[in-house]
Amino acid sequence: MTDVLILGGTGWLSGRIARRLLMNGATVMCLARGGRPSPEGASLVLADRDGADAYDAVRGRDWDHVVDVSSNAAHVAGAVEALGERAARWTYVSSVSAYSDDETVGADESAPLHQPADPGDEYEYGAQKVAAENAVRALGERTLIVRPGLIVGEGDPSDRFGYWAAAFLRAEDGPVLLPPAEGRDAQVIDVDDLSEFIATTAATGVINTIGDRHPLSEVLDAVRRHSGHRGHTVTAADDLLVANDVEYWAGERSLPLWLPSEMTGFMTRSNARYRAAGGELRPLDETIAAVVEDERVRGIDRERRAGLTRAEELALLQLLG
């Protein structure tokens, strides 16, 4: 039986990885701060990764596989130092945000990275991921570093992809505001496809675990179709959105998936290595249907971490006449 330690295991992605490993017959232990339960069948060790004793309860035993999802480079380096010597395999979940080149279309895993964060640096997501990757690389050929792009699916806590399902659902036969889509793309990976890959692959090295490239307009059209939206859509220009303090990509008062026109490479990276390693991608329509249903269940008018409120959207639509 495979003994797996997940540094995390109670969150959205890490919890799904834990459940997939349990389905495979592994014994799974999760190390987390608490506040959320571990998946049924997994054990939970409570620990603060900022503490000097963070890994005492799991140190000194052999692990067949350690999985870490942290975005804190100091946490990752501390785990490698404490546990790396006795781990047969180590998987680190990084991000395509580790890349410094967001313009080159079709770039693969050899693309340049951000400078790694130094201890004490002000937090910057991409730089932290690069520093964390460097710590994991010290373990040699038994490591897998996955770089996902936009992870989507049921229960997504970021609310980015789900925003569009909610926007079309809440509008019913009213208008929906869209960002400029011409020349822009979207790449998403279903959280369950990513979890399956991490839990089952024997691959090592660095792999972009990302979906296929789709024109942004086609993705939004598909979400609209699955949502049953009966109204019309209105596309706002970049300069109008920027002038009215609408944010790119994520966060409050944003239009998720909208990126600056010069970021032509961010959502167009190569996933050839993922495909070659046996990584699978379910049909995008299947993922969209699940997200639409999830938004209905969770509530389309709930407070969200990303997107516009309906009132904000209507105010912008009024500006456009």
Image (cartoon, rainbow, N blue to C red):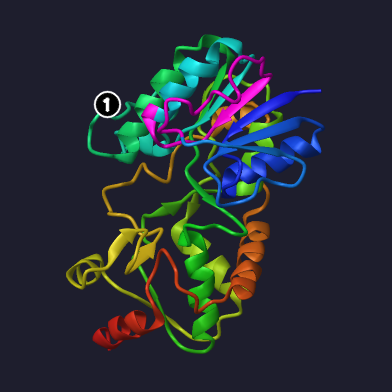
Q: Is residue 72 magenta?
A: yes
Q: Quadrant of the C terminus?
A: bottom left
Dominant secondary structure, magenta: loop
The amino acid type, in three-letter code, at marker 1 is Pro
Q: Judge whether residue 278 can be spotted in this image.
A: yes
Q: Which residue is mark 1?
A: 119
Query: Could you tell whether 70 is left or right of 227 in the image?
Result: left
Above or below for 295 versus 109: below
Residue 176, image x, y percentages: 43, 79
Residue visible at 65% across and 60% down in the picture: 285
Outermost residue, left side: 243
Q: Crowding at label 1, few (<14), some or many (≥20) Cα neighbours within 10 Å? A: few
SS class of the residue under badge 1?
loop
Q: Which one is in front, 86 or 296?
A: 86
Residue 234, given in percent of the width and then of the height, sits at: 37, 79
Camera sees residue 279: no
Q: Is residue 281 magenta?
A: no
User: Number of marks in the image?
Assistant: 1
**For residue 258, which quarter of the picture?**
bottom left
Q: Quadrant of residue 197?
A: top right
- The structure residue drawn at horizontal position 55% and vertical position 10%, both measured from the top left corner, is 85
Location of the N terminus by quadrant is top right
Coordinates of residue 255 in the picture (x, y in percent) = 36, 66
- Which residues are the magenta region? 49-74
Which residue is nearer to you in this view: 95 or 124?
124
- At 47% from the left and 55% from the top, the residue drawn is 215
Image height of 156 relative to 271, above or below:
below
Front one among 239 and 244: 244
Residue 236 located left or right of residue 21:
left
Q: Is residue 231 above or below residue 191?
A: below
